[in-house]
Structure formats: structure tokens, C-alpha cells
Image (cartoon, coloured by chain):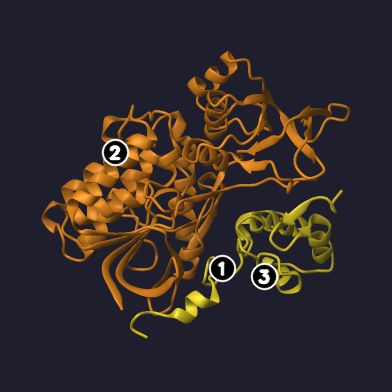
Chain colours: A orange, B yellow
């Protein structure tokens, strides 16, 4: 039987930071990721990060992934399993891993779930036509695999992912016909939105896609304007000829393993859907199971890394590692997290966390 | 509208079909799963679950946070029978 002190599920920014923090305190860690390389969504993020220096501001996502991987390797305490999917959590506190043609149980003493998120989809007539992608999927295709997704794109969603991927499409020589946003205002940061506007891409707020047309793949879409109640305004329909539609309408935490582990969960729209109740050290309602990153509630990579560090420190301390430095380190990380969640951009997350706290209290 | 809108791509189920189960009185994702196989394909409901929960919530006038999110059973992704039959090295 494969045994490990701490199993970290997911090798994105949160999981890497968790494994690193736990290993630096002296714990023996296994880090499992289903992809062939660590880094999670960082491996395709060619744009620079904001935030503070502690979370690698002004570095590009791809560089942050490299730095974290090197640090993880240098500890000599982290066993890295790539191409390894954690497929289930069982009543006897074991998990199963599928890696290539191997399928085996693992007995961890602590588990940190840093499983990340999935892209939300839209349903409308023709929504299953080839050529309709999640925006994140298009970013992976272009920036990781070097594949051009098509020639003329419409983007649904003017949040940060929508505007950043639109800009990267333009960089790749793909025409962006329009960015379509159902809300009356742009959700992404001004700097990102201004860049695509300067390049002449229209951002159509209060608009939605109502139909996709095509015989075997996408040929055009019908869009329409929305009124204050988000209902389609009659007569406002028009067609856009595009061969790619990118859907960027938010993310949902990947929570199925947390459900299987019996963690108590609450539905909080501000955090992206079902997220686990947890304490300040990110331990869930099940002792010994921690959560970090998007699985704990949709946020940014910088905050995910700090959450990972807190969960890693706490899981290590609960096994007796680094007890003398735990309080100092976790207090510092907590301060960083509060800073990252501060200001107007953190308002949604702060509201979400407050709601989660309330739900957890009601559930007792 | 409804026939051309595919809600569950894995099992090829349209909005019209899902709505017809809801009209017949099915109230949870798990109930609809048992009659239609929704959520039982390769993605295990990752794509369709949110849409179906919203449709069910709207039909019954229940807030989304009060909806039962469905049961999540291992494995979370399809695994080849040959891989499972191969077993662990300790077996």
C-alpha cells in the first residue's frame, strides 16, 4: 500500500504552494496532478500578474509555475506524481489514483484538496457545435499547444478571462469580431479591457448569444440586446459570422472529491458554487482534510498560493512538523490573504466568505 | 426551441427532454439521472449538472442553495476495466 503523510491533490498554484510549505516544515508529501506537467492553469498564462511581491507580482504565470516547480523539487521531500488522477475518496480514508495503466489505493494521513475549477457553459440552440469552446480551453490550445483555434472569434463574457484571452487571440493573429457581455458593464480589470478596445474590438454590454448556426461546425451566431431585466429585446437580433465562439462565463469549484469525503458544503454564488465549510487554517469539517485555491472558492492565483501555504503549514503542524514556527508563519500568511482580499476587487470574495460563515453556523 | 439545445452532451439529451422529465414531476438531479442517464457519461455531470439544478430550482421555485447537488460517486472519471483488473502490485 502506498502511504504518505500528506497527499496534495492538484499541482496548480494552490497545490504547489501547499506541498512546498508542508515539505519545508519537514513533512513527507505526495503531490498528484492529472496533467503531464505541474502548474495548473499557470502553464498557459502568458500575462503578468498584479498583486504584491510576495505572490510574484509582475511575473508571468508561466514563470511562476517554473519557480514553484523548482522550489518543490529542491525540497527533496515531495514525491511528484504527474499524469495521476485522484479518482475517488473512500470511507476507509483511502483515495484511489489512476496513473497511465496503473490503478492503486493510497493511504494518506492528511489530504489537501487543491483541485481547482472548471469552466461554466451556456446552453442555447446549437451550443454543442464544434467551434464552441471554453475560453480557458482556447487559451490552452494556443499558448500551450500552439494551435490556432480558428480565424474569427466571438467572445462571450467581458470578465478578466474573457478580455485577456481576447487579447491573446489578437496576439496570435486571430480576428476578434466582438466581446459579448450580458451584464451592463465590463467585469474585467480596466487595463485588460482598454487594451482590446484600443485594438478596435467592440465590447457589447447588455448583449447575449441566442443561437449558433452551422452544418458540421460553427458558421455564425445570432446575438441580441438585453433589457434591464436581462430579457431579449425584440428586433435587436443580428448575426455575426464567426468560426469560433469562446465562452467565458465564470468558473465553478471542482468539488466532487470533497463531497465524497463527506465535507459539509454550502452553495455560495459569490464563490462560484458549492464550497466546503472550513476554519481559518482551511481545514474542512472532516478532520485532516484541507482545501485551497479555486476549490475553496473562485479567486485569483495569488490568493490561491497563500491559501495553499496556510493549508500546507497547518497540515504539517497537525502531524507535529514545524510547530515552533507555525504560528508566526501562518499569521503572516493570513495577513497577506486579508490584503489580497481587500479593496474593491475583493468585495465579491469578502461577501462570499461572509455568506459561507453564516451558512456554516446555520448548519450546526 | 428545446430540441436543438443539448444540455447533456455525453448522453445527448436535449433541453426538451430534460424539461419533459421535470414536467412529469421529477424533482432532483439524481431522479432524472436514473430515468435518462444524464450525468452518467464521460464528464460525470460536470457540464450539465449546474444547468439541470437551475431548471429544477426554477420549476419548483426553490432557491438554488437549497437544491440537493446530486450524489458524487467514485470514480470521478471513466477508468478502463483493464486498468482496474490490473490491480495494485500488492494484490
Chain under label 2? A
Give the residue furthest to the bottom: B91
Tell me the element at label 3: helix
Residue A39, percent across and down?
38, 46
The front one of A344 and A31 is A31
What's the distance in space between the residues labelled 3 and 1, CA to CA?
A: 19 Å
Query: How many residues crowd mark 1 within 10 Å: few (<14), some (14–19), many (20+)?
Result: few
Tell me the element at label 2: helix
The front one of A231 and B17 is B17
Q: Quarter of the image containing the N terminus of chain A?
A: bottom left
Against A189, is B52 above or below? Answer: below
Circles 2 and 3 in contact, beta carbons < 8 Å: no
Q: Residue at x 68, y 58 (%)?
A: B53
Query: How many residues crowd mark 2 within 10 Å: few (<14), some (14–19), many (20+)?
Result: some
Do discs 3 and 1 share a chain?
Answer: yes
Residue of label 1: B78
- Residue A336 disc label: 2
Residue of label 3: B30
Q: Residue at x 52, y 71 (%)?
A: B75
User: Is residue A238 visible in this depiction of the protein?
Assistant: yes
Do discs 2 and 3 share a chain?
Answer: no
Residue A132, percent across and down?
68, 42
Residue A32 located left or right of residue B80: left
N-terminal of the two: label 3 or label 1?
3
Amino acid at each position: 500500500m502506498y502511504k504518505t503523510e500528506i497527499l496534495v491533490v492538484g499541482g496548480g498554484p494552490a497545490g504547489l504552494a501547499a506541498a512546498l510549505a508542508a515539505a519545508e516544515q519537514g513533512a513527507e508529501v505526495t503531490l498528484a496532478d492529472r496533467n503531464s506537467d505541474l502548474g495548473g492553469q499557470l502553464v498557459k498564462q502568458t500575462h503578468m500578474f498584479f498583486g504584491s511581491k510576495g505572490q510574484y507580482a509582475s511575473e508571468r504565470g508561466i514563470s511562476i509555475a517554473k519557480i514553484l516547480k523548482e522550489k518543490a523539487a529542491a525540497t527533496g521531500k515531495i514525491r511528484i506524481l504527474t499524469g495521476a488522477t485522484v479518482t475517488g475518496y473512500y470511507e476507509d480514508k483511502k483515495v484511489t489514483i489512476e496513473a497511465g495503466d496503473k490503478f492503486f489505493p493510497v493511504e494518506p494521513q492528511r489530504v489537501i484538496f487543491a483541485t481547482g475549477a472548471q469552466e461554466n457553459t451556456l446552453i442555447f440552440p446549437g451550443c454543442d457545435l464544434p467551434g464552441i469552446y471554453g475560453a480557458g480551453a482556447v487559451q490552452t490550445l494556443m499558448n500551450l499547444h500552439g494551435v490556432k483555434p480558428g480565424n474569427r472569434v466571438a467572445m462571450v463574457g467581458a470578465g478578466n478571462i474573457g478580455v485577456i484571452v481576447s487579447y491573446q487571440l489578437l496576439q496570435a493573429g486571430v480576428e476578434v469580431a466582438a466581446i459579448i457581455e450580458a451584464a451592463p458593464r465590463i467585469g474585467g480589470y480596466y487595463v485588460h479591457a482598454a487594451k482590446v478596445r484600443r485594438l478596435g474590438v467592440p465590447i457589447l454590454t447588455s448583449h447575449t448569444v441566442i443561437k449558433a448556426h452551422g452544418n458540421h461546425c460553427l458558421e455564425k451566431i445570432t446575438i441580441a440586446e438585453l433589457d434591464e431585466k436581462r430579457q431579449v429585446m425584440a428586433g435587436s437580433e443580428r448575426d455575426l459570422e464567426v468560426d469560433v465562439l469562446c465562452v467565458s462565463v465564470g468558473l465553478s469549484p471542482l468539488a466532487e472529491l470533497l463531497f465524497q469525503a463527506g465535507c459539509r458544503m454550502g452553495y455560495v454564488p459569490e464563490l462560484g458554487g458549492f464550497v466546503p465549510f472550513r476554519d481559518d487554517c482551511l481545514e474542512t469539517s472532516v478532520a485532516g482534510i484541507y482545501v485551497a485555491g479555486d476549490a475553496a472558492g473562485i479567486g485569483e492565483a495569488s490568493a490561491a498560493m497563500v491559501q495553499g501555504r496556510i493549508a500546507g503549514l497547518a497540515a504539517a503542524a497537525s502531524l507535529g512538523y514545524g510547530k515552533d514556527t507555525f504560528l508566526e508563519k501562518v499569521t503572516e500568511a493570513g495577513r497577506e490573504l486579508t490584503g489580497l482580499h481587500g479593496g474593491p476587487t475583493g468585495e465579491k470574495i469578502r461577501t462570499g466568505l461572509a455568506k459561507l460563515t453564516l451558512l456554516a453556523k446555520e448548519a450546526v | 426551441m428545446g430540441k436543438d439545445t443539448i444540455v447533456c452532451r455525453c448522453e445527448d439529451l436535449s433541453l426538451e427532454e430534460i424539461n419533459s422529465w421535470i414536467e412529469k414531476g421529477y424533482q432532483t438531479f439524481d431522479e432524472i439521472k436514473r430515468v435518462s442517464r444524464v450525468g452518467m457519461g464521460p464528464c460525470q455531470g460536470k457540464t450539465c449538472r449546474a444547468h439541470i439544478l437551475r431548471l429544477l430550482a426554477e420549476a419548483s421555485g426553490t432557491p438554488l442553495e437549497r437544491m440537493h447537488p446530486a450524489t458524487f460517486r467514485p470514480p470521478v472519471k471513466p477508468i478502463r476495466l483493464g486498468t482496474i483488473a490490473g490491480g495494485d502490485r500488492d494484490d
